């Protein structure tokens, strides 16, 4: 029989390797779980932040819509008021144009009557001068007699 050295204990070596791999697998599993938990927490924080931002944006959009609606109502009211004022202005212009036409007609009548009165006065003045001249001559004739 051959005297051989006892060979390495394969069972022990395999058991050591197995123990090392199990330790490595456990460490990798824990690291993966921690990484996963960290990522889940990050995503949850992002979801919460995004939800808050969306809620804030929705509130802002709602407020802006309300403001827009109020401004549209205000613009419509201003346009209606403008139309009413323009209509009132047109009515007032028509009324005052009519009144002005009446006044101009009255002024024309008064000017015509004034011209007639002046002409009459001129005639009467001529007659008066003629009569005064006749009177003066008659008085002179009377004095001569």
Image (cartoon, rainbow, N blue to C red):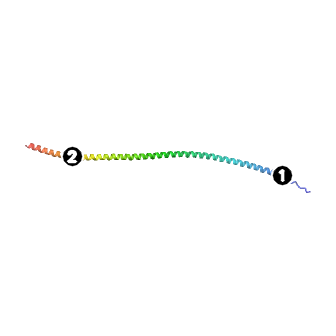
Place of residue 24 in the rendered image (x, y in percent of width and height, measured from the top left) = 76, 50
Horizontal arrangement in the rendering, residue 85 relative to residue 67 (left or right): left
- Left or right placement of residue 2 versus residue 41 in this view: right
Mark 2, other Cα within 10 Å: few <14 / some 14–19 / many ≥20: few
Residue 100 versus residue 7: which sits nearer the camera? 100
Q: Secondary structure at mark 2?
A: helix
Which residue corresponds to mark 1? 11
Of the two numbered discs 2 and 1 on the same chain, state the one appearing first in sequence: 1
Q: Secondary structure at mark 1?
A: helix
Q: Residue at x 47, y 46 (%)?
A: 76
- Answer with left or right where residue 77 lies relative to residue 137: right
Q: Quadrant of the C terminus?
A: top left
Quadrant containing the N terminus in the rendered view: bottom right
Number of numbered labels in the structure image? 2
- The residue nearer to you, when weighing 2 against 114, is 114
> As rendered, which of 19 and 86 lies closer to the eye?
86
Q: Residue furthest right?
A: 1
Residue 68 percent across, percent down from the top left: 51, 46
Residue 19 horizontal/vertical position (percent) = 79, 49
Q: Are marks 2 and 1 in contact (CB under 8 Å)?
A: no
Please tell me the numbered disc located at residue 86.
none
Front residue of 99/40: it is: 99
User: In the image, 19: left or right of 75?
Assistant: right
Residue at image location 31% in from the left, 46% down from the top: 102
Please tell me which residue is depicted at 43% across the width and 47% down the height of the picture: 83
Q: Give residue 120's mark.
A: 2
- Tell me where residue 127 appears, x and y as whole percent: 17, 46
Q: Residue furthest left?
A: 145
């Amino acid at each position: 029989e051959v005297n051989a050295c006892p060979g390495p204990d394969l069972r022990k070596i395999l058991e050591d390797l197995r123990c090392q791999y199990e330790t490595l697998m456990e460490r990798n599993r824990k690291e993966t779980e921690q990484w996963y938990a960290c990522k889940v927490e990050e995503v949850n924080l992002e979801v919460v932040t995004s939800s808050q931002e969306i809620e804030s944006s929705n509130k802002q959009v709602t407020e802006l819509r309300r403001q827009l609606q109020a401004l549209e109502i205000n613009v419509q009211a201003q346009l209606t008021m403008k139309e009413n004022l323009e209509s009132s202005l047109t009515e007032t212009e028509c009324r005052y144009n009519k009144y002005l036409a009446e006044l101009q007609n009255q002024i024309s009548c008064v000017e015509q009557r004034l011209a007639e009165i002046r002409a009459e006065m001129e005639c009467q003045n001529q007659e008066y001068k003629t009569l005064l001249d006749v009177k003066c001559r008659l008085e002179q004739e009377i004095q001569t007699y």
